Image (tube, rainbow, N blue to C red):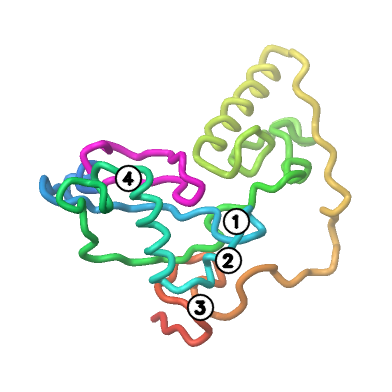
């Protein structure tokens, strides 16, 4: 793909981020071929998708990915590209259902503020209160907001208010079973896994 020379946030409703590794990484450098890595998301109805892609077969996910790539790069992929465009030589689907949380309305009330009840303790990270979803960008913004709190404290200025703890987050509450993928495979604990189905083998 000659149009990509770095990591791209996509305008696609399926492919949120993608990169041509043959251009981005020296170890994959190749002037004749592209090695694409893509994030296929959202992948379930709870995250905003109209289909549970986590449960879909690899072949269906790859077909949907190629359809989106044809739309995004019509001069390089698909029947409209010169010579038929790029062809897939090898593909792998890795499922990581808990890689990011579902950015659905109302989640921000559960995030703690950078200011805390402890005078010398400030919180920063993508989990803390900030305007982006759980991401590197969110973590950076949260760090900047935490730095503002530290500077305000050092200058004896009033800091941003402490967000009250949401009523659903209470100490001593009975433990709850985690919601999500069931089983003892890596995919159930947030790890990546190749293949799908109840009897998938993963060492």
Q: Are marks 2 and 1 in contact (CB under 8 Å)?
A: yes
Residue contact at pointers 1 and 4, CB within 8 angstroms: no
Q: Nearer the viewer, mark 4 or mark 2?
A: 2
Mark closest to the chain's N terminus, 4 or 2:
4
Q: How far is mark 3 from mark 2, CA to CA?
A: 19 Å
Q: Mark 3 or mark 2, which is nearer to you?
A: 2
The residue where tag 4 is placed is: 19
Q: Is residue 2 above or below residue 183?
A: above
Q: How far apart are labels 2 and 1 at the CA level? A: 7 Å
In the image, the segment drawn in magenta is 1-20
Few, some or many residues within 10 Å of mark 1 (<14, 14–19, 20+): some
Residue at horizontal 63 percent and vertical 26 percent from the top? 145
Q: Please state the horizontal and vertical placement of residue 98, each as a whole percent of the image.
A: 56, 60
Q: Which residue is mark 3?
A: 185
Question: Quadrant location of the N terminus?
Answer: top left
Q: Which mark is residue 28?
A: none
Q: Residue 146, percent across and down?
A: 63, 28
In the image, what residue occupies the spot 65% across and 32% down? 131
Q: How many tags in the picture?
A: 4
Nearer to us of marks 1 and 4 is 1
Q: CA distance from mark 4 to mark 2?
A: 24 Å
Q: Residues within 10 Å of mark 3 (few under 14, many from 20)?
A: some
Q: Which mark is residue 49?
A: 1
In the displayed structure, 136 sits above or below 30; it is above
Mark 1 or mark 4: which comes first in sequence? 4
Other residues around mark 2 within 10 Å, as few (<14) / some (14–19) / many (≥20): some
On-image quarter of the C terminus:
bottom left
Name the residue carrying label 2. 52
């Amino acid at each position: 793909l000659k149009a990509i020379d770095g990591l791209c946030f996509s305008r696609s409703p399926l492919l949120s981020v993608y990169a041509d590794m043959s251009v981005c990484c020296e170890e994959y450098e190749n002037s004749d071929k592209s090695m694409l890595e893509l994030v296929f998301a959202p992948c379930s109805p709870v995250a905003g998708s109209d289909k549970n892609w986590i449960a879909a077969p690899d072949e269906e996910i790859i077909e949907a990915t190629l359809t989106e790539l044809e739309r995004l790069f019509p001069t390089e992929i698909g029947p409209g590209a010169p010579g038929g465009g790029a062809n897939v030589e090898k593909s792998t689907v890795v499922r990581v259902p808990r890689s990011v949380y579902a950015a659905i309305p109302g989640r921000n009330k559960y995030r703690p503020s950078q200011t805390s009840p402890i005078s010398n303790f400030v919180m920063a990270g993508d989990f803390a209160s900030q305007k982006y979803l759980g991401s590197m960008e969110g973590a950076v913004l949260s760090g900047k907001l935490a730095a503002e709190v530290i500077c305000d404290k050092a200058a004896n200025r009033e800091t941003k208010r402490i967000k009250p703890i949401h009523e659903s987050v209470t100490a001593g509450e009975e433990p709850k079973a985690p919601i999500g993928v069931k089983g003892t495979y890596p995919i159930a604990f947030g790890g990546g896994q190749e293949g799908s189905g109840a009897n998938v083998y993963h060492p």
